[in-house]
């Protein structure tokens, strides 16, 4: 069995239809439990109750970047191997990534105001994240603007390659760009730098929940795109006859 | 009752806005999927 078998829309629809209920159930359980658990955590001695925003901000920001990376991989598969399902999956992922980016920006601003004394700062990570949102919007606009689906997939694929610079920048900016308010990584494998277990475990669960939520929405949206493509093909055939 | 202290507005605002955005995304995804499925079934039946 090869992964390329899933480039066949029929095979993709059959397999995704079978696993979707399990992914949706996992997403619901992990997200609801993680967010509830996170909301019930005690106040932090420095940040007070604003620490509870971490359970939305970190998973959303993580997904915003990872979704762009997923779109990059799918776009490369389209550009190199011309598999339609991969182009449709990249298209389907973009609105989810845009919403995750908006959630990351809003929760960051709401958290930043009481902690930093400002809603916004032209900090390297914040700025590159805002540019990432503009790339998401541009990517979706380009898909809507180009009528021929294959040309749209080509052009958005190239845009995705360019936008990847900002996706990576928003993740790694704090490491090589030392000015700015934003902290470094929230989670570390170094025991001395670790977040307290009281916050760490619900955060892991919420991150898993957001990952599964993305997968659920991605599968549903890709199935929608495949159906729309099939409908357009049937209508075109009907017009010809 | 959970005590959110002086940051209650910030915490509840962040949760409220985020959950509203996620809810809207889920609703739009399901609605678009149902519409696409309905349109395709209609076309396959009559086409």
Image (spheres, grey):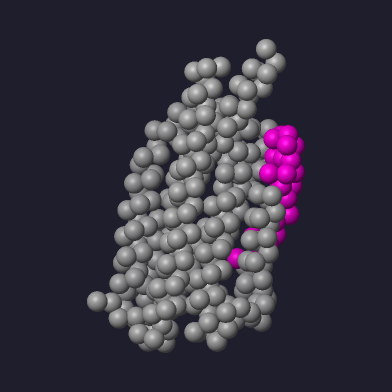
Residue A166 lies within the magenta run: yes
The residue lying at 54 percent from left, 75 percent from top is A109
B19 above or below A89?
below
B19, above or below A4, in the image: below
Which quadrant of the figure has residue A204?
bottom left
Q: Where is residue A44 in the image (x, y as percent from the top left)?
A: 37, 82
Residue A185, visible in the rendered structure: no
Identify which residue is drawn at 35% across, 56% down. A30
- Residue drawn at 42 percent across, 87 percent down: A46
In percent of width and height, residue A181 lies at 60, 81
Q: Is the magenta stretch mostly helix, strand or loop?
A: helix
Reply above or below: A203 against A114. above
The magenta span reads A142-171
User: Residue A117 sits in which quadrant?
Assistant: bottom right
Q: Relative to A191, say whether A210 is above or below.
A: above
Q: Where is residue A234 in the image (x, y as percent from the top left)?
A: 61, 21
Q: Position of residue A167 (x, y in %)?
A: 64, 60
Identify the residue shown where x is 43% and y is 61%: B19
In the image, is A40 to the left or to the right of A203? left
Q: Farthest left residue?
A: B1
Judge by depth and name the residue closer to the eye, A220 or A5. A220
User: For this view, does A111 lie left or right of residue A154?
Assistant: left
Quarter of the image where the C terminus of chain A is located: top right
Tell whether position A163 is magenta.
Answer: yes
Towards the viewer: A126 or B47: B47
Asked if residue A35 lies left or right of residue B42, the reply is: left
Q: Is residue A148 visible?
A: yes
């Amino acid at each position: 069995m090869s992964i390329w078998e899933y480039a066949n829309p029929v095979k993709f629809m059959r397999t995704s239809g079978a696993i979707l209920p399990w992914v949706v159930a996992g997403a619901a359980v992990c997200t609801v439990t993680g967010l509830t658990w996170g909301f019930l955590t005690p106040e932090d001695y420095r940040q007070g109750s604003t620490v509870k925003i971490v359970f939305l901000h970190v998973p959303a920001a993580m997904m915003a970047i990872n979704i762009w990376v997923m779109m990059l991989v799918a776009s490369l598969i389209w550009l190199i191997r011309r598999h339609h399902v991969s182009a449709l999956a990249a298209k389907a992922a973009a609105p989810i990534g845009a919403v995750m980016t908006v959630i990351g920006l809003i929760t960051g601003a709401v958290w930043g105001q009481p902690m930093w004394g400002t809603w916004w700062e032209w900090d390297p990570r914040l700025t590159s994240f805002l540019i990432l949102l503009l790339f998401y919007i541009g990517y979706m606009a380009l898909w809507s603007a180009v009528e021929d689906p294959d040309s749209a997939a080509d052009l958005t694929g190239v845009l995705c390659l360019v936008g990847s610079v900002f996706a990576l920048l928003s993740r790694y900016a704090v490491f090589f760009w030392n000015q700015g308010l934003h902290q470094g990584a929230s989670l570390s494998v170094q025991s001395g730098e670790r977040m307290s277990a009281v916050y760490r475990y619900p955060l892991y669960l919420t991150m898993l929940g957001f990952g599964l939520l993305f997968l659920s929405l991605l599968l549903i949206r890709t199935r929608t795109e495949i159906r729309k493509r099939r409908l357009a093909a049937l209508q075109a055939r009907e017009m010809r006859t | 009752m959970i005590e959110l202290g002086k940051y209650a507005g910030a915490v509840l605002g962040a949760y409220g806005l985020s959950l509203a955005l996620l809810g809207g995304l889920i609703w739009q995804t399901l609605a678009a999927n149902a519409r696409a499925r309905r349109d395709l079934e209609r076309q396959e039946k009559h086409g």
